[in-house]
Image (tube, grey):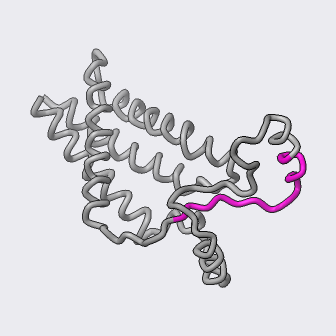
Amino acid sequence: MKKQLIASLVGGLIIFIWQFLSWSILNIHGAEFQYTASQDKIMECLVQQNLEDGAYYLPQAPTGSTSQEEQAFMESSIGKPWATVSYHKAMNMNMGMNMFRGFVVDVVAVFLLVWLLLKITNLNFNTTLLASLAVGAMGYLTIPYLNSIWFETNTIGYIIDTVVQWGLIGAWLGWWLNRE
């Protein structure tokens, strides 16, 4: 159990550091959030609508519409502008708690991977590396990539993160778990 805990803590730290580099210093995800000179006008309009905190897909048929009304609405929207908006009434800059929660999630993710890897008989470095990359690929394909299909977003940053962070984890675990 000690070996699994050390593997998870170090692995979680590796992912955490990569994520920090990816989102800040390296700015790999810069294309996902673009600047607009109209941001003040857009924010003013959103505030005036007295929205509740949440995510909005625009345009959308009103709640309670029949399936026929929804279908007609969607057909009338084809070719017109659309947007997704994540709206919050107040910016929360509690970076300490967010970073702590992020680190815990990273450690738990690596712990689960280690648990799976330790179920493999004759585990070796190559199997560990490839299995780690496969787990990362499954996460990428089923969340960021599927979302990019429906919401037409850029996932280049996420595929880079997948390969680098799960490759690093695979290398770390391949060495750590297979040493005697």
Counting labels gives 0
Picture coordinates of residue 75 (x, y %)?
A: 89, 46
Q: Could you tell whether 95 is left or right of 39 in the image?
A: left
Q: In the image, is 116 to the left or to the right of 76?
A: left
- Residue in view at x 83 percent, y 46 percent: 74
Q: Is residue 42 magenta?
A: no
Could you tell me residue 124's position as x and y percent? 29, 26
Using residue 35 as the reference point, say whether residue 101 is left or right of it: left
Q: Name the residue nearer the viewer: 74 or 152.
A: 74
- Is 118 placed above or below 153 here? above
Q: Residue furthest front?
A: 64
Residue at left offset 30%, top offset 67%: 95
- Magenta stretch containing residue 83, yes or no? yes
Decide which of 150, 83 is in the foreground and name it.
Answer: 83
Please tell me which residue lies in front, 100 or 5: 100
Front position in the image: 118 or 33:
33
Q: Is residue 17 above or below residue 174?
A: below
Looking at the rendering, the stretch of residues picked out in magenta corresponds to 73-87
Q: Residue furthest top?
A: 121
In which quadrant of the rendered image does the N terminus lie? top left
Q: Is residue 16 above or below residue 109?
A: below
Residue 110 picture location, percent across and down: 29, 39
* Residue 132 on image: x %, y %: 39, 35
Residue 37 as seen in the image, left or right of residue 73: left
Q: Quadrant of the C terminus?
A: top left
Location of residue 64 (image quadrant): top right
The residue at the point 36 percent across, 57 percent down is 18
> At x 42% / y 32%, what residue is drawn?
130
In which quarter of the view is residue 39 placed? Answer: bottom right
